[in-house]
Structures are given as C-alpha cells and as structure tokens.
C-alpha cells in the first residue's frame, strides 16, 4: 500500500519561487483590511458548524495565486450544505484574506479563532503563516493546508494536505532539517529513459537555492545535470535554451516564476529544443496552459506535472467527476482547487465522526491525529502523521503524473497508487 511521505525535495521549496514575482513590488495590506466574508448557511434549526479559511488572496505575488484551495473547499461545503450539512447542521465558512503578510496572518488567526470561534481551519494557503504557533497553542486543528513554508512540519495540530513524518514539536523537521524524496527524478529516468537534465534558474538567492536542491536530487538519481542561470532583471532565455539543446537535455526543470517559465518555453520553441519533458509542479497544474503558453506549442505539449493528488482533468474517476461538476461555474480549474476540495472533505469526515458527542476542536483534532492513511475518497495519496523520532533514510513513495496534450488537457500517466519507488530522503533547510 502506498504510504504518506515527506514532501519531495524537488517540490518542497517551490513556494519560494512565488516570491520572485513580488520582489520589486513591496508589500501591502489586503484591500479588505482583513475583513472576512461569510457564506449564507443552508436553512436549519440547528446551529451551524463554523470553519475558517485563511488565504493570501491579495498578496504581493498577485491575485488568484493562492485562491485555488479556498475555492475548492468552498465548493465542497456548498455542495455539503445543499445535501443537508453534517448531521443536519450546515457548515458556515468564515474567510480571511491575510494579504500575504505575517501581520495580516496573525490578524486573521485572531479573528477566526478568538472572535469567530471556528471549530477548525481548512485549506489554509498563506504566503507567511506567522500565526501558526498561535493556532497550535490554541489547539485548533488546521486541516489540509498547503505547506508553503515549514509550519506543517513544525507545529502540532497543523495537518498539511500531504501529511508529515516530522515530530512537530516546535522545531522544523528534525533539528531544523526537512527531508524529501527523489521519486520525480526516478520516474523520468525509469519510465521515460531520461539521462540528462537541465535546471534553469535566476541569479537570485531563492531561485538559485531551489535550483541547487533540484540539482542535488537529480545527481542522487544518477543524472548528468546541465545548469543554466539567467539574469533576473534582463534574462536571456534564448541563450539558455540554445545551450540546453546543445547539451542534449532530456528533461528541463526550473527555478523560475510563471512568467519566466512562459518565456523559457517560447525560447525553447524558437531554437528548436526538443525534450522528453518540461517538468512543472502542482502550483502550475492548471487549465490555463493554452493561454499561458499560447506562443510555444511544442514546449506546451511537453509539459508534465507531478504531485500527490489525482489529476483534476481525469473525469473517468467518480471522485474527480463530482469535483468538476460542483465547480463547473469556476472560470478555470486547478490541482490546488481539487486539493482544497479534499481538505474540506477531510474536515467533514472528522466532524461526522464527532456528530453524536459534539463537533468540538478537541474531537476533530483527535480524528486528525490518528496515524491512519487518509485518501479523501481516492483524491489524495494516502496521508498520515507519524512523528518519527529520526528521519527515514529511504522510503517507498508514490506520485501522480500527468502531461499536457492539446485537445485533451492534462492526461494522467498511470495510476498514482501504483507509480511508486523506494527512494532516498534528502535533507534540506526550510
């Protein structure tokens, strides 16, 4: 059976790339000044069950960057309430936009926990989760959040959507080190025959650090690695694309923001660089590929995405089909939306287990804290929270893989529950 795993080393630091887009933008408070919205609960004689969703909706990196999990969770709760809620009680969602700042995040945590008295947080997606210690100390379960930083591998009562093996006793990982596997690189080596990989980055600290992490994982899997670095202010992607073509790269990984990825793909098409895969991660696993990559058809059809949840385009799966039907009104779809939907389902299953004795923070937290594999009706690879005293040296880990094909969208490549490898776990600093 596939098991939960530490975050992949190749993906764990990916969120630092979000900061690249906002480097020259400074910071700002959200337009709403942290005011939280509400949904009207379904009619019921019983008091609603109140949950909170914190999202960096108006962060410095741009609108809609972090809203996918929120939208997926809200869609699930809307559907749940339309079907009678939890034991006849509707779920009332309180939203809070933290603006992508630590100050704003602490404000949201205070509002939702101390003023709104939410039972739990769901699908948290925060650029700076500064309020995490406060959530933990209040023993409020935070369910299915996106691990953009190290909070979900640091604090008890926080349950990231991908699980955690770390002790979570107030220090990130094990002695300040997190660990991730190399299954992505193993997959492309064994399943696609790749041997040479290019890693493209900016000459900027966060980008360069992430590129070194990817390079470390690739070398651990025996790849020949070609590194390409471009100037952050005036990037010459055409030169990088020409060199990776000359070097015979089979794969291309990057430490770039979305805009940089688009430019790199255009340059690859211009110089005629053909690769087995241009690999991206769950953040870029979206339905906007045709628009984003409209000027690079060859590179566009070489895009592959990897993650830990079932392809949102795979409507042959009943659980995915239900998600898509419930979210058909959204302008775009993404893997983060599906994972937010799964987070809401997770809370719902926890709350249902508590319905007879009372849906309290303690009861919901007790459900979450059990080291049992959770899959959200097959949408997630089995997730658990094990609190290992020492990090594993190797681990059998699985992954979800999809590739983009014009006219078909994201096409799953095999079943994620059987695409598994025994791989080393590599340390890195959060």
Image (tube, rainbow, N blue to C red):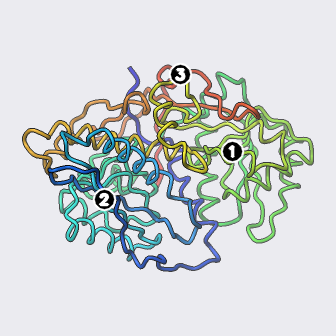
**Separation of disc 2 and disc 3 at Cα?**
33 Å
Q: Which one is earlier in the sequence, the residue at label 2 or at label 1?
A: 2
Name the residue located 14 percent from the left edge and 40 percent from the top edge.
354
Q: Is residue 279 above or below residue 153?
A: above
Q: Which one is earlier in the sequence, the residue at label 1 or at label 3?
A: 1
Disc 2: which residue: 52
Can the viewer see residue 35? yes
The image shows residue 97 at horizontal and vertical percentages of 42, 68
Name the residue located 86 percent from the left edge and 51 percent from the top edge.
267
196 to the left or right of 214: right
Quadrant in which the C terminus appears: bottom left
199 to the left or right of 165: right
The image shows residue 235 at horizontal and vertical percentages of 80, 64
Query: Farthest right residue?
Result: 271
SS at circle 2: strand
Name the residue located 14 percent from the left edge and 47 percent from the top edge.
359
For the residues labelled 2 and 3, say whether their Cβ atoms are less than 8 Å apart.
no
Nearest to the observer: residue 28 or residue 7: 28
Disc 3: which residue: 415
Task: Write down the quadrant of residue 63 in the picture.
Answer: bottom right
Disc 1: which residue: 253
132 to the left or right of 146: left
Nearest to the observer: residue 417 or residue 236: 417
The image shows residue 35 at horizontal and vertical percentages of 37, 74
The image shows residue 57 at horizontal and vertical percentages of 49, 65
For the residues labelled 1 and 3, say whether their Cβ atoms are less than 8 Å apart.
no
Q: Residues within 10 Å of mark 1 (few under 14, many from 20)?
A: many
């Amino acid at each position: 059976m596939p098991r939960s795993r530490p975050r992949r080393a190749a993906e764990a630091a990916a969120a630092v790339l979000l900061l690249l887009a906002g480097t020259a933008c400074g910071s700002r408070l959200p337009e709403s000044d942290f005011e939280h919205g509400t949904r009207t609960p379904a009619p019921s004689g019983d008091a609603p069950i109140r949950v909170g969703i914190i999202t960096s909706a108006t962060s410095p990196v741009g609108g809609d960057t972090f809203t996918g999990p929120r939208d997926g969770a809200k869609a699930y709760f809307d559907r749940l309430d339309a079907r009678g809620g939890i034991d006849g009680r509707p779920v009332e969602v309180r939203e809070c936009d933290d603006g992508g700042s630590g100050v704003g995040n602490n404000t949201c945590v205070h509002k939702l926990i101390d003023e709104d008295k939410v039972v739990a947080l769901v699908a948290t997606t925060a650029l700076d989760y500064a309020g995490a210690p406060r959530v933990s100390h209040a023993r409020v379960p935070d369910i299915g959040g996106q691990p953009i930083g190290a909070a979900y591998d640091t604090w008890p009562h926080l349950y990231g959507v991908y699980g955690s093996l770390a002790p979570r006793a107030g220090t990130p990982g094990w002695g300040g080190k997190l660990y991730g596997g190399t299954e992505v690189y193993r997959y492309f080596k064994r399943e696609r025959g790749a041997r040479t990989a290019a890693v493209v980055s900016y000459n900027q600290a966060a980008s360069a650090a992430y590129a070194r992490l990817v390079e470390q994982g690739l070398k651990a899997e025996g790849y020949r690695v070609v590194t390409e670095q471009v100037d952050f202010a005036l990037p010459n992607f055409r030169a990088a694309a020409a060199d990776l073509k000359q070097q015979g790269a089979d794969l291309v990984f990057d430490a770039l923001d979305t805009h940089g990825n688009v430019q790199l793909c255009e340059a690859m098409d211009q110089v005629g660089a053909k690769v087995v895969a241009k690999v991206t991660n769950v953040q870029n696993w979206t339905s906007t590929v045709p628009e984003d990559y409209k000027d690079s058809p060859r590179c566009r059809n070489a895009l592959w995405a990897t993650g830990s949840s079932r392809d949102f385009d795979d409507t042959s799966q009943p659980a995915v089909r239900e998600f898509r039907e419930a979210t058909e009104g959204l302008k775009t779809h993404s893997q983060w939306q599906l994972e937010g939907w799964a987070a809401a389902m997770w809370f719902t299953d926890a709350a249902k287990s508590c319905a007879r004795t009372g849906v309290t923070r303690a009861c919901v937290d007790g459900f979450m804290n059990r080291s049992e594999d959770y899959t959200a009706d097959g949408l997630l690879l089995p997730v658990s929270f094990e609190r290992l005293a020492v990090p594993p040296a190797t681990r059998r880990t699985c992954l979800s893989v999809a590739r983009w094909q014009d006219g078909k969208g994201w096409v799953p490549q095999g079943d994620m529950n059987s695409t598994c490898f025994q791989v080393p776990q590599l340390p890195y600093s959060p």
